[in-house]
Amino acid sequence: MPARRYSFKKILIRTGIVAVVLAACWGGYVLVQQMPQRQQQVATTKVRKGDVVVRSYARGELQAVRSASLVAPNLFGTVQVTKLAQLGSFAREGDLIVEFDDSEVRSRLEEKQLELDQVDEQIRKAEADLAIRNNQDQVELLNARYSVRRAELEVKRNELLSEIDRKKNLLTQDEAQRRLKQLESDIKSRLEQSKAEMAVLFERKNKAVLEMARERQRLGLVKLLAPMSGLVAIRQNFSGGFRMFGMQIPDVREGDQVSPGMLVADVLDLSELEISAKVGELDRANLREGQDVLVHLDAIPEKQFTGRIKSMSGTASANFFSADPAKKFDVTFSIDMKTLMSALGAKSEQIARVLATAAKNRGKPPTPKPVPMAGMPATGVPLSGVMDGGGMVGSSMDGGSGLAAGAAVPGAAGAQGGRRAFAGGGGTSMPDGDRRKLREAVEKALKGRSIQDLSPEERQKVFAEARKAAGLGAGSPGGRQRRNGEVGPGGLSAPMPGLPPMVYGGSSIFTQAQFENAKLPPAPEEDDQMEVLLRPGLLADVEIIVEKIPNAIYIPSQAVFEKDGKLIAYVMRGSRFEERILKPLKRSESTMVISEGLEPGEVVALADPTLRPGDRKKDSEKKSPGGSPMGGMSKAGGA
């Protein structure tokens, strides 16, 4: 009996201990569950009333309205920079911007000149040999004819001679006639063979002339002159070497080797600058052209400038490489240049000079286009050819990189290998009617002769007569004749015989003297801050004043939620929150203006108070309906 009581007592003690432990665990669990609820506090804010200024913000890149990009030519060799204008220097039209090493080109030019001289000597030797052979053939032909005549006279005496002598004279006459025919046939064959050899030599000369012209044109590409007046901006050297993401790429400097077709420098017309930016869909609906904006440049953070909306795109586009996949609209903003230059410390004379230059550049196209070379024939000597790469001075351009000296490229954009072709008076730049007239005039001036048999001087004379007969003048297709001393760029003291004059294909025609005497623009002053505008990709913040709303009721966009397709806010009543349906008037990324549903002074929740702690974290990762991609709002006053 005592043993049973002891066992029952032990069971009760153990059961009590287990119950106490379970109760403690349950109490701890409940306490842990209640602790976050006691510590969780919902952030709130008051509904305000006051004047609200609706603003949109954009971030864009500062760029010049008119600019000319200079590209490295294809010299078929090393393209090394020997002279380079300083960043921020003011260049006038015709000033030297970049000069490349021309030693290899001049070496090839001398080789081509030597080859051309050798071909000329071979032609002269062949002509002399042909003349000597013709004289010998004429002597032999005359002797053969005399032999035939002598045989004929001997035949007339046959009546007085014996039968054997008569047959002998007849055989002698037949032999002399056969020799004469054979000699005439041989002379004709040798003459045709000599003409064929001369034609081969002339073709070799034509090839040498064409190669010589190409080398002369490449020599003209070693200097890049400013096609218009403006400030010089130096590009970064992206050619060669291993680059990692985020590396700082240095600017092009003297002594650097660059790749053909690479952008080396820009000539910027700073009279008009613009900012290219992208805005969201809601911004696009609230913006209009001519709207006032405030501009903050990263390079001048302490100053503010004014501007206007210049243009807006009608369609949205997305940048695949951007972190923001949303489609946005392109917007261009203009900026007050006079105020900007004054803030940068520019002198009044410099401002007046830049603005005067702008008025001159305003009448020019944004990117000067090359014009064809003058004086190239339409028929006869096959001087038409195609060059790839760096292009040719005065050549026609179908599009791509590698422009003539001082020519400009359209933006960016671009650097495709363009096609460069010789064009001339009867080329692609001439109307069909004029080309046909010139061809007929050339054929008439040749008078049945082959143009390959003519000397270079005779060819020039034939083309001059053909142009005059066709009423096209002796100059270029545009009617401008080259003055004395104006030859194609290339550094040669005199034009090569048989070569047409070369014209620079840019906004201006640079003479030989201009190319030889072109100098670098003066360096900018040490305290000149204009160079801050020349850095590629200079960023700027644009603040757009969309609308001013007086006496508006507004709350943060964070306090607006969507439920069952309606916008609601949680308004505090005592210690609890109640839902309130809202009617918005204006909304942006940061603020929403309310027309109905709230009163000033009421307290609203900045987070959904009905969500559990775990759900609240998930909900915070979702995008709020009020957080649309629109600009911000700032209050001018509040209640």
Image (tube, rainbow, N blue to C red):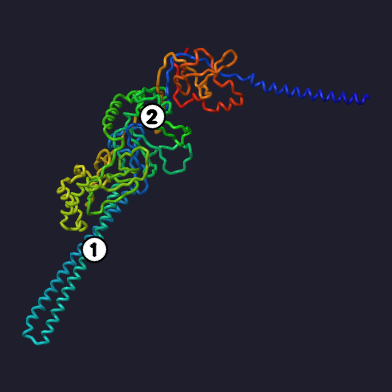
SS at badge 1: helix
Q: Earlier in the sequence, mark 2 or mark 1?
A: 1
The x and y percentages for residue 299 are 41, 27
* Residue visible at 27% across and 34% down in the picture: 364
The residue lying furthest to the front in this view is 564
Residue 593 in the figure: left or right of residue 468: right
Tell me the crowding category of disc 2: few under 14, some 14 to 19, or many 20 or more residues within 10 angstroms, Cα based: many
The x and y percentages for residue 527 are 37, 27
Q: Are marks 2 and 1 in contact (CB under 8 Å)?
A: no
Near-viewer residue (49 or 574): 574
Instruction: Give the vertical position of 487 relative to 579 (above or below).
Output: below
Numbered tag placed on residue 196 in the rendering: 1
SS at badge 2: strand
Instruction: Give the vertical position of 166 relative to 592 (above or below).
Output: below
Q: Which residue is mark 2?
A: 331
Q: Given the image, on which type of amino acid does mark 1 rest? A: Ala
Residue 448 in the figure: left or right of residue 503: left
The x and y percentages for residue 454 are 19, 57
Instruction: Give the vertical position of 197 relative to 258 (above or below).
Output: below
Task: Tell me which corner region of the image, top left, top right, bottom left or bottom right, holds residue 268.
Answer: top left
The answer to whether one can see residue 106 in this image is yes
* Residue visible at 52% across and 13% down in the picture: 602
Q: CA distance from mark 2 to mark 1?
A: 67 Å
Numbered tag placed on residue 40 in the rendering: none
* Residue visible at 32% across and 36% down in the picture: 68
**Tag in front: 2 or 1:** 2
Instruction: Give the vertical position of 140 relative to 262 (above or below).
Output: below
